[in-house]
Image (spheres, helix red, strand yellow):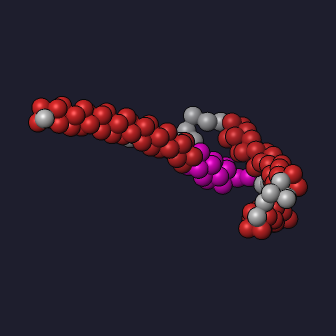
């Protein structure tokens, strides 16, 4: 069986659209840092008297980290329309690989959650069975 490359069946315009969509997503995600700075600052302001020094310092550290992310200059987005096809295919392969990694991560996370839930239910059932058997054995001995 021969595997077909992931870019086969995609037009150049479809690949460019996907890559530009991702670039726009990355630029929009930077706005989340502003939101986190405001949220953390409001939390610190509202609970300032109740917070310990360690909590205050942790919040200041969070704000500092978010601000550092905002201060890093973002490189200009590449012009995919003027890029040679070979380079465009390489960018698309890389983007597809990262997308697949993210999907796999979330799938594993969901599977781990379900496995943990199932293990807890089995443990509870076995403990209940064990406790009821202990009670029955105890009643027969007395």
Q: Position of residue 80 (x, y in %)?
A: 75, 49
The residue drawn where x is 36% and y is 40% is 119
Horizontal placement of 104 versus 38: left or right? left
Residue at (33% x, 39% y) in the render? 123
Where residue 22 sits: x, y (%)? 72, 45
Question: Is 87 one of the magenta-colored residues?
Answer: yes
Q: Nearer the viewer, residue 97 or 115?
A: 115
Q: Can you tell which quarter of the image residue 73 is in?
A: bottom right
| Relative to 79, 9 lies left or right | left
- Can you see residue 79? no
Q: Residue 128 placed where, x, y %?
A: 30, 34
From the viewer's perspective, is 13 left or right of 8? right
Quadrant of res 132:
top left
Depth order, front residue of 79/71:
71
Closest to the observer, 24 or 83: 24
How far across and down, in percent of the image, does residue 89 sit? 62, 49
Quadrant location, the N terminus: top left
- The region drawn magenta spans 80-100
């Amino acid at each position: 069986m021969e595997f077909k490359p992931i870019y086969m069946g995609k037009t150049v315009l479809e690949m460019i659209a996907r890559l530009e969509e991702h670039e726009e997503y990355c630029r929009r995600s930077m706005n989340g840092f502003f939101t986190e700075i405001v949220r953390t600052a409001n939390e610190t302001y509202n609970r300032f008297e109740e917070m310990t020094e360690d909590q205050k310092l942790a919040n200041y550290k969070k704000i500092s980290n978010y601000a550092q992310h905002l201060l890093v200059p973002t490189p200009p987005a590449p012009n995919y329309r003027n890029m040679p096809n070979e380079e465009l295919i390489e960018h698309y392969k890389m983007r597809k690989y990262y997308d697949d990694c993210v999907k796999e991560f979330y799938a594993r996370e969901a599977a781990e959650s379900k496995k943990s839930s199932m293990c807890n239910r089995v443990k509870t059932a076995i403990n209940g069975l064990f406790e009821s058997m202990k009670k029955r054995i105890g009643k027969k001995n007395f």
